[in-house]
Amino acid sequence: MGKKASSKNRKRPEQKAHRTVYRGTIEITRSGMGYVTVEEMHRDVLVRPQHFQTALHGDTVEVEITRHSGSGKTEGSIVRVLKRRQTIFIGYLQFQKQHAFFLPETDRPMPDLYIRESDLNGATHGDKVVVQLTQWDAKKRIPEGVVQEVLREEDAGDMAMKQILLQSGFALHFPDEALEEAARMHDVITPADLKKRRDFRDVLTFTIDPVDAKDFDDALSVRLLPNGLYEIGVHIADVSHFVLPESALDAEAYQRATSVYLPDRVVPMLPERISNELCSLRPREDKFTFSAVFKITAKAEVKDVWLGRTVIHSNHRFTYEEAQEIIESGEGLYRDEIHLLNELAQKLRKERFRKGAINFSSQEVRFVLDENKKPIGITVKESKEAHQLIEEFMLLANKHVALHVGGIQVKDKPLPFPYRVHDTPDETKLGIFMLFARKYGHTFDTSSPEKIAASFNQMLRDAAGKPEQHVLETLGIRTMAKAVYTAENIGHYGLGFAHYCHFTSPIRRYPDVLVHRILQQCLDGAPEVDKKMEQKCRHCSDRERAAMESERAANKYKQVEYMSRFLGEEFAGVVSGVASFGFWVETVEHKCEGLVSLFSLSDFDDFRFIEEDYCLMGRRSGKAFRIGDKVNIKVVAASLDKRQLDYELVLGHVNHTEEVVLRRKQPGKNHPKGSKRKR
């Protein structure tokens, strides 16, 4: 479970009274065993339940090594909890002999919490409640908590979303101290402020955002210069002007590290006073910004870059749909400026792909909700030119900020900086994918990372509009590494950039706040070396993954909630994934994914999983189910508790381009052994 650490990054364990103590993160399995991941150790440290002390799943702990086995297994005991991953839980209240106890609803073992009468907050026996862990140390055997909120069964969807957030370590509320700090702030622009900033208030500026956005963290300005060049300003909300290091707001923003976007709510990284008011680049308001200003030719060649703090005044707020209408129709407010920006963006995009960026397409599925936040419809949003317009200028700003800081050294060493990096594809995954792509006539040149990227783009161009397009895109994305934050710059492979960072969304991403602070230090000529930068990068990457997992879980819940109304109905679908225990199907109409289990297929044939072909193959018929295949399914089960949809195959399965009718086997013959369902 643990990762091998390179020798240059290994740290000596802390010695405490002749004891060997390490810092790490504990994972408690559903069976109750604990494993502490220690960065500088080859293997995880096994911790038995009796040695947990007060540690809970996900906590940062100190672990003492107590035993080494001959097989290399290491056992330990928790010495101290350094940081709680989660302090707020959902569960049920139970009274026993005039004492109240909270029973957490969690799939990881943890003790019940004692609730004092004064901390019940009106809750009674059997209530489902939100409770905060308040006291628990080694001297107190029983942890204590306070009821924050009583939940009602009619709010099942709300409870599910809160449970998802809490299990991922995201707080439901901001601390009072952080809210008080935000409330005391003002956005009055003084003459002293203007002396430190470049004034863009007289330059045409506007925002383009989703229709339901409230936090506008980027704006574009545009004007023609006397020398014939275009000046394009990328203006970003100056969050670092308000959120200062070591403040309560900064501590909470760092802990969250990201905003979380669920289908029915946004859990912001910063209080709404900051995100939706002080920092949001709302139209017809003067705002503090941090900007990247480019002088660009009509061919989209960057001739000059200026970085610094600014003041802007947004003239108008466009939605993506409004901007797209202007692009397509040629009519509308600021049509000439929008067309100019779009033409430049498309040239930047074309050049980016020419230099090695990989052109994977994407779709965004969003739920239409009623007044009770229940899903009543689903919409699919594709990336159009209006989206690409914003994307290209944000990428340009991110790249040039990273380029600027990347060229600065302190004592002959690179300045620690939160780069956004993306590694080259995993060789094993790429090898399997190449064999699969070859079956469709696509070959890869693996002589260099650049040639691999070019091969991907050629494959995507050749497959466009063909039946295999979806499967090749899906599997191609799965060969890619995950982008992360790190102080060690290895470039961004997917974008084809040698230097890249996140500068353009400080309202919703903490790394962007760090970037703003470091950039200002560099512009002032006084960069500071942050020895904890890599630790901060790892934390932000971890929180980003937790947010993505929360978003996936919440989307799945809403899918199940929506599809539960269609039990017994049949729909057309596309195979979206294959495993040894069945295959997943995404309905064409709703984009909702469910599992067709191997057990449910046993009436048709005995199917086996062939990994290199990404398919299930019938032993008798030779018929296969592959990603991208069209099938017809029936919705047979929808479990909100498990966030799980179960489908069954309907006769008349379409395999690639030919129709195949699978016939049911004779009862009692050729049923697969051990067809117990796995997930």
Image: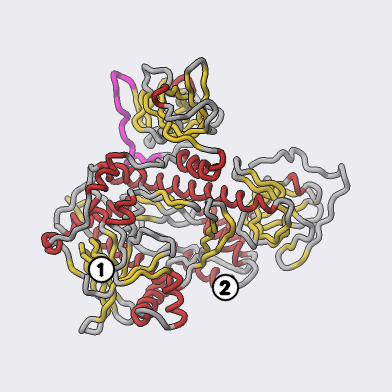
Q: Seen from this angle, which residue lies furthest top?
A: 97
* For discs 2 and 1, the disc positioned in front in the rendered view: 1
Q: Is residue 198 visible?
A: yes
Q: Is residue 42 above or below residue 332?
A: above
From the viewer's side, name the closer residue of 130 and 604: 130
Percent from the top left, x then y, of residue 469? 60, 67
Horizontal arrangement in the rendering, residue 635 relative to residue 241 (left or right): right
Give the spatial CA distance, label 2 vs label 1. Answer: 45 Å
SS for dot 1: strand
User: How did the renderer colour the structure?
Assistant: secondary structure
User: How many residues crowd mark 2 within 10 Å: few (<14), some (14–19), many (20+)?
Assistant: few
Q: Quadrant of the C terminus?
A: top right
Q: Seen from this angle, which residue lies furthest right?
A: 666
Q: Which residue is mark 1?
A: 313
Percent from the top left, x then y, of residue 332? 40, 80
Q: Which residue is mark 2?
A: 462
Q: Which residues are magenta?
A: 5-19
The residue shown at (53%, 51%) is 372
